[in-house]
Image (spheres, grey):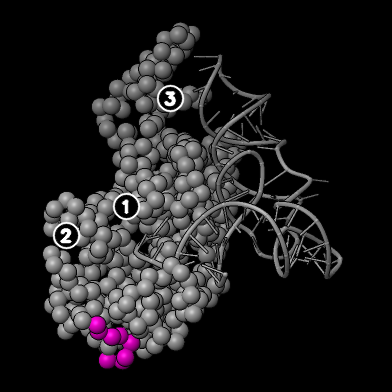
Amino acid sequence: MLYIYNTLSKKKEEFIPIDPPNVKMYFCGPTVYDFFHIGNARSFVMIDIIRRYLEYKGYKVTFAMNLTDVDDKIIKKANQENIDPAIVAETFTEAFMEDIRKLKIKPASLYPKATAHISEIIHMIKMLESKGYAYNIDGNVFYDVKKFSNYGKLSGKNIDDLESGSRVEINEEKKNPLDFSLWKKAKPGEPYWESPWGNGRPGWHIECSAMSCKHLGETFDIHAGGSDLIFPHHENEIAQSEAANGKHFVNYWMHFGFLNINNEKMSKSLGNFSTARDILKYFSAESIRMLFTQSHYAGPLNFTDELLNSAQKGLEKLDNLKTTIDEFLKQNKPGVTPDFDFAGFQKNFELSMDDDFNTPQAVAVIFDFVKEVNKVILSNQSISPDFFIKVNNFLICTAQDILGIIDYSETGLSDRKLETDLIELLINLRMQAKEERNFKLADQIRKGLNELGIDLKDSKEKTSFKKVK
RNA sequence: GGCGCUGUAGCCAAGUGGCUUAAGGCGAAGGUCUGCAAAACCUUUAUUCGUCGGUUCGAAUCCGACCGGCGCCUCCA
């Protein structure tokens, strides 16, 4: 049984899909006005792992991740650079796609864009208007939060507390400072669409309500996003969708903790960010994913290079085992099949993931597994290929297909014939030198290869090599 | 002011009443192996879970107070 912490109930709840085996899931994606930073990457990666695990469990997941492609920030950027806002959106949508691909994030089922759903958005606003939840002031349409009695149920806030807070902007036009824009009247030079209220564009919150309804239905299973979206964005989505459709909106709300720098939230406005694309220049996607996987998705994670290094270092254990196994499989020698509790490890991995996607614990299971396998290899003279295939299968299933912290599918050096042959030639020469006890030459070859990024490893009968970063 | 999260070894981080007199990763120390390395393996590295009280046969885990860190309430993953 899978348990998920639900922000709405503030409890871990058993996950029961509305229409098994189908699962409908929505994630509030980026506003495409800039490259995304490593903090954004954390939630993209974590929702990816959650999605992969649900698929592993046999669910058919429809995963929608929206792209906000019309918005104040995009317009601002376009004005600064004196280009069309649509070009800004297009450029950074492409950059987004490229970066998530590099992070080995599985593509979502669909990436709905706000600008492609203007008619659905207008339709929903009209419904809200006809039901008395919206009011129009001179082409600006607002949501009347006082009309929605459950306002605040997700964030645990109540309207009166919010009103007395000094930070809520006072806008003379609105009935209540908390009322938010559904439709924004176009200012000169801004992109606009025609609507019953005049030319304008959608507010930020309404797009998610309209698009999730269109693609996932009026009520769906999982809605996720960063913790900073709980209020007001997700609260407003609930208000819009439930008022318009008259139905319960979402069953499980999931929220991701922040990535901090020096214990402070990484954000564009604070300027304390590194883009994912920059970090990918120095670290592999696997290392980055490993770092994220090693802490729970809901908690904070203080980001440092040192931690990334330690994640990368940890992965070497998995890489080394892979190299060892490849060697054995290449030899294809018969041997005994040792007793090994594969099912037990699989079970523990699942139990960890079933407990609100406890990835740190799941990774611990993988490391325990690797340690046990290494022991078996050390204490047996000959082992059957069958055993190694099972080891590989476990790692491919858990570490690769679910967590994405290793990638066995990558074509490594061993697939490049000429290089491999040359390296093996050098290895043979070195073997000869070693036999003649010419260690000076042997070390010279090893050192030289190492400088080219090839690490040698001697064992009793032979020398193996692997490419390092 | 309101709401919420958080404090576990040198660093990161699970565990949230007995199966844990606290997983896993990094780092550090010693050992086995090796021509030397590397890798792997073994051993060591928190009698203790922010502090002080309380509940309980039993608490890191529940309750209370206090101290510290962070977030949201304004765009933000």
Distance from label 2 to label 1 (Cα)?
Answer: 18 Å
Q: Badge 3: how crowded within 10 Å, few (<14), some, or many (20+)?
A: some
SS of the residue at dot 3? strand
* Rendered location of residue A30, percent (x, y): 31, 60
Task: Point out the tag, 2 or 1, that comes first from the N-terminus.
Answer: 1
Callout 3 amino acid: Leu
Left or right: A73 as drawn, with respect to B55: left
* Rendered location of residue A163, percent (x, y): 45, 76
Q: What residue did someone put label 3 on?
A: A456
Q: Write down the region rendered in magenta.
A: A130-137
Of A422 and B29, which appears nearest the observer?
B29
SS of the residue at dot 1? loop
Q: What residue did someone put label 2 on?
A: A85
Task: Point out the tag, 2 or 3, that comes first from the N-terminus.
Answer: 2
Q: Residue at x 36, y 53 (%)?
A: A269
Callout 1 amino acid: Phe
